[in-house]
């Protein structure tokens, strides 16, 4: 990859070692991630909305803007006021609009939200988990924004990490259940501790060493689809995809060896 994408995405990528991410502390991690998304894209505001499928609505659980300088909880955009726009949020990987948009499905949103709040550009990316829409990351600018592939890479990586953090939270719950099962077994105390440690070690290794290259591979695949016609960008992304695939292969080999040794 060229230096520009690497530099722009680097601040996001360092969060792969975040204790909140690995520990499944979902709100803590989004509190770390959203400000960095905002700063990386030189935006006015960035937010994460959780999608409640049972009520067919979005709920804002984290927001950051350059005025407050503090992560906060704020109200999500009332998508019921923009029915066509709301459908786009649930059906398109990327949504990007600006104050000069002439698309009908964006018209009310541009007039009632962008112009009303003195914004010039807005972008959103879906966050998926376990084959379902999990949420939306949104970014807002008060000036005209040229949305490029580097911005897409930052948002895809951020979306992958949010899904990864939720996976870590679920694995912690599973690990807790495993520990309870272990405590009910009539085995020696040392065997209990040994088995519990193995379960915890394998869960951590999967989260830390396998999920990260896998999330990056999924992000790169989406980005390749979006840049199919740009040969130079396509070749750069393909090379990065090969590197991350090799990293994943190495991680799987190490995990296989650990299981065999145990």
Image (cartoon, helix red, strand yellow):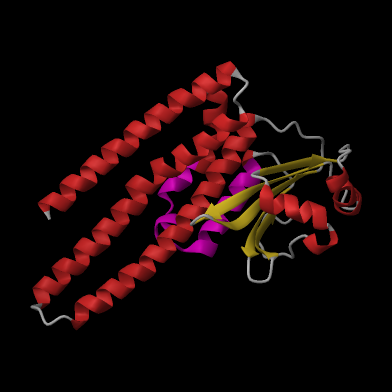
Q: Main secondary structure of the magenta part?
A: helix
In-image side of 43 versus 17 (left or right): right
In-image side of 17 versus 43 (left or right): left
Locate residue 256, reporting x and y percent. 20, 46
Locate residue 240, reporting x and y percent. 44, 27
In-image side of 16 versus 155 (left or right): left
Locate residue 192, reporting x and y percent. 15, 73
Given residues 206 and 104, the one toward you in this image is: 104
Locate residue 99, reporting x and y percent. 87, 40
Q: Write the residue at 40% across / 56% down.
A: 22
**The stretch drawn in magenta includes residue 22:** yes
Q: Which residues are magenta?
A: 13-39
Q: Write the residue at 50% across / 54% down.
A: 163
Above or below, 231 relative to 40: above
Q: Write the residue at 56% across / 28% down.
A: 5
Q: Write the residue at 54% across / 64% down.
A: 27
Q: Is residue 184 visible?
A: yes
* Quarter of the image where the C terminus is located: bottom left
């Amino acid at each position: 990859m060229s230096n520009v994408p690497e530099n722009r995405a680097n601040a996001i990528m360092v969060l792969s070692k975040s204790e909140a991410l690995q520990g499944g502390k979902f709100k803590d991690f989004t509190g770390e991630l959203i400000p960095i998304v905002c700063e990386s894209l030189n935006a006015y505001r960035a937010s994460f909305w959780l999608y409640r499928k049972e009520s067919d609505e979005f709920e804002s659980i984290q927001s950051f803007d350059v005025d407050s300088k503090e992560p906060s909880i704020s109200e999500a955009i009332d998508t019921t006021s923009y029915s066509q726009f709301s459908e786009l949020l649930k059906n398109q990987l990327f949504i990007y609009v600006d104050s000069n948009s002439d698309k009908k499905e964006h018209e009310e949103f541009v007039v009632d939200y962008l112009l009303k709040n003195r914004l010039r550009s807005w972008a959103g990316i879906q966050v998926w988990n376990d084959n379902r829409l999990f949420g939306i990351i949104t970014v807002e600018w008060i000036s005209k924004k040229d949305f490029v592939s580097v911005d897409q890479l930052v948002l895809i990586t951020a979306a992958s990490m949010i899904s990864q953090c939720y996976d870590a939270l679920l694995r912690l719950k599973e690990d807790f259940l495993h520990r309870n099962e272990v405590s009910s077994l009539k085995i020696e105390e040392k065997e209990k501790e040994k088995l519990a440690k193995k379960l915890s070690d394998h869960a951590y290794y999967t989260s830390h060493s396998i999920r990260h290259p896998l999330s990056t591979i999924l992000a790169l695949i989406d980005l390749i689809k979006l840049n199919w016609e740009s040969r130079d960008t396509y070749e750069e992304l393909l090379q990065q995809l090969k590197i991350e695939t090799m990293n994943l292969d190495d991680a799987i080999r190490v995990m296989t060896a650990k299981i065999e040794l145990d």
